[in-house]
Every structure is written in structure tokens, then in C-alpha cells.
Amino acid sequence: MADQNDYMGRTGFVDAHGLRDKAEQDRVPEVLKRIKAEDLEIIRLSFPDQHGLLRGKSVMADEAEQALRNGCTNTTTLLAKDTSHKTVFPVFTPGGGFGNPEMGNASDIVMVPIPSSFQVLPWAPKTGWMLCDVYFPSGNPIPFFTRQILKDALAKLSDAGFDYLAGLEVECHIYRLEDPKLAPTDAGQPATPPEVSLLAHGFHYLTEQRMDEYDPVLELIRGDLLKLGLPLRSMECEFGPSQIEVTFKPRGGMETADNMMLYRSAVKQICKRNGYHATFMCRPGLPNAFSSGWHLHQSLLNTKDGSNAFMPASDDALLSDVGMGFVGGLIEHAAAATVFTTPTINGYKRYKPNSLAPERTVWGKDNKGAMVRVVGAGANDPATHLENRVGEPAANPYLYLASQIISGLDGIKNETQPPPPTDNPYDPSAQRLPSNILEALSALSESHMFRGSLGDEFVDYLLHLKHAEVERFFSEVTDWEHKEYFEMY
């Protein structure tokens, strides 16, 4: 019988539906003990949404035990929002516009905290944090929950005899916040962006002088990130003004995606609290701003012995047969996969020739202009891996990684052979990456492979969200249009 104060979530929800394995359940007492020892007052419960943003609720510390046992309810409408946070599905209808009976009438979802994700947030006094998985009240998984999409992809990879290892290389901009634009007239969906100034002029790529100019804010960031236990590898001064790059040590697929979620959110929060503005937007609309990328380093490990499945057996080969199939899949499905790797309208403005960003669906050995770069010293090098340079920092990490696994597995299964490696990554005769998001959406819509792997329900859901974003874009008058037509006509 439930206690009269057992009012959070759904009583006994986690146990009733078997939603936590023994290793995670054994962490629950440790989490509760630490909440008490740290004298925390509030716990943020967050789940990654369809856009790779953290959403959730904050509960008082003495409610954490209930949340861990019963979950915490939230609303399905959070899964119906585009990037302006507008609801773009008819949620107050049967099926909620999703064609799913459990999504109708803005009904509940249940967030289930993951005990091993527990953190004390260094920048937020007396505040704890836990990542959550989300479920329907029936205990069924939600087909639109992107963390589950990656779980399923990793499970298919495991069934094929492989584990996934990935390292992050992420660029972003950090500016000094001059005016947050908080007048009531600045509110909106989306709101007026803040006014900012530079930390340094930029262009001194990897110079110690520029790095030292950035260091006061990077000192704040790295100190808190290390307290979170994030596996930082390096912090670097990038080419553009106020642009930095952070790299991470390789980790398993789900850990890598979770780390990216926590990293992005932490950097933005730390900066805002200290008078800065961090943005993972690909190409800020500011003078002299440079595009930021997210390069994903990845390899497969053989489950039986932990050996590198991409490692070639001889110096005559760049990759093993498994590695060649994986590259073949990445190349074949690159156009459709850009919806996952480059999900914003803005991100496609990065694909420029001779820019250290890819423009063509090509691959090559140690070639930083190619979409896929093979990194390795030849035969029997256990560090052999692929670097996909196609992504933008705003990508949902669960979908980015899942798209790589799904494409690569398809290539391995079908023994897909990639075209010859290139020394001319911007060759105009090579297949071009989508030049805009509409081309990418069309490619995904027509992809039998992604529809077969992810299901029509999820693909059509994502297409609906992105088309709503595109329609809003075309309904706005841009600076380009005003300059082009206002005086001439």
C-alpha cells in the first residue's frame, strides 16, 4: 500500500515496469546519501528533448526518493515543440497529431531519473542534477525519445558483435554579454538575441596570446566541468573571434552522448552566471564570425576481445573490411543523415569549399577537407578510427551518434564499398552534401534505410518538426530581402 505522502509520479512506477537494472538500482541509496551529505535543497530532473535541449522539473531534495521510485510526471507537449518552443502538433486531439493514442490531449509522460547520472552542479548552490529517461504512464517506451533511439542503435550494434567508441571535438563561441535584451518587448518565440562583444579579435589560430586572453572565462568553465567528471582532453583557441574548441577522451556511445548534453548545458549556464554568452549555433550572424563544427571521432570494437574492428591487417589498406563497409554506409547515406548531423537551417552555411569543413560526400586518409577522415598509422594500429567532420555543434547527440551507427551497420551488412579515397576533397565532380535543409529533409523522407531502421513514425515526426521550422523561416522578412528589394522596387 502506498504511503499517504506518495504523491509524485506514478506509485511504484520503476519497479512495476522493470525500468532500472540492478546496477542502477544499487546506486539509489548512494544518491540519497549524497544529497543529504551535500545539504542540497533542490534536484533538477532533466531529459533530452528532440532538439538536444534539456527539459524537465526541479524537485525539493526531500522529494528525490519518491522521484527515484515513482518517476516524475511531465507533459507530452514538450515533444511537440519546434526550435522556437512553439507547439506544432494539434496536441488536444486523439493521438495528439502524432497518430499515437498515448500522445493525445496533452497527457502525461513519466521521467525516470538515472541514478548513475547524479551530479552536484558546481555553479548552482545546493543544487543536484539527474538525467532522466522518459516513458508513457503505461510503462511503454516513447517512440520520439531520442535517447531511446540511440539505445536501440547500440543494441543492434551489439547484436552484430561490436561496441561503439566515440570522442568529441566541439567548437563554440563565447562572447561577453553586453545587453541580455530583457525588456518585455524583447520577449517572443523566439526572443530578441542578446547583444555581445568579443573576448578577443581572433584569427590568431592556436596562438598562446589569444588563448591567454580567453583563459579567464575558460578557467571558470574548465574548473566546473572537471568537477562534473567530464573527460576533457584539450581546450584550444580556434580561428574565429571568440571561438574555442574543446575535445574529449573517447568513451562508449551512450556516455559520449550524455557527456555532450551535460557539456553544452553546463557551458551555457556557467557563462550566463558570469556575464558571458556561449553559443553552439553553427554560424552566428555577427561580423567576422566563423562557422563552428562538431567533429565526431569513432571506431568499433570487437565485443569478444575488445580489439579495434577498423584496424587494417596490412599497410596496403587504410581500414579493415569492417571499416570499409562502415565508411561505405556513411558515404551512401550521408545526404539523409545530415538531418541528424546538421539539423538547423543555419548549419548548412558551413559547407564551403577550402574551409576545413566538408562540402562533398568523400573520404580520405588524414584529409581534413573530406567529410570522413581516416586516422591511423597503418597495420595493427589500435588507435585507427574515423573522424566525421560533417556535424554542427547544435546537433542532438543521440541522433548524431545513432545516424552514424545505423548508416555504418547498413554498410557492413551489405558490404558497401565506398568510392576511392580522395586527395581532392572539394572536387566539383564528387557528390555534394545537401546545400540546405530542404534538400536534407527530402533525402531523409526518401530514405528507405532510415525509415526501415527508425520507423516511419519517428521519421515523419522529425520531418514535421523541421518543416514547421522551415515554414517559420520563409514567413520572415530577412535582411537580405530588405537590401535586395526595398530600394530597387
Image: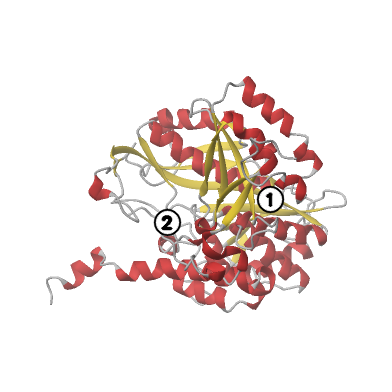
Residue 141 as seen in the image, left or right of residue 83: right
Instruction: Work out whether mark 2 precedes mark 1 in sequence or the reverse, and give the earlier one.
Output: 2
Residue shown at the point (61%, 38%) measured from the top left: 130
Q: Residue 82 at x, y = what percent? A: 45, 61
Question: Which SS class for mark 2?
Answer: loop
Who is closer to the viewer here, 40 or 400?
A: 40
Label 1: how many Cα within 10 Å (few below 14, some 14–19, many 20+)? many
Q: Residue 249 at x, y = what percent? A: 64, 41
Check disc 1 and report the residue beneath it.
Answer: 253
Residue 74 in the image: above or below residue 204: below
Observer-side mark, 2 or 1, equals 2
Q: The disc labelled 2 sits on which kind of residue? A: His
**How many numbered callouts?**
2
Residue shown at the point (46%, 60%) measured from the top left: 81
**Quadrant position of the N terminus in the picture:** top right
CA separation in Å, label 2 and label 1 = 28 Å
Residue 354 visible (yes or no) = no
Q: Which numbered circle lies on residue 85?
A: 2
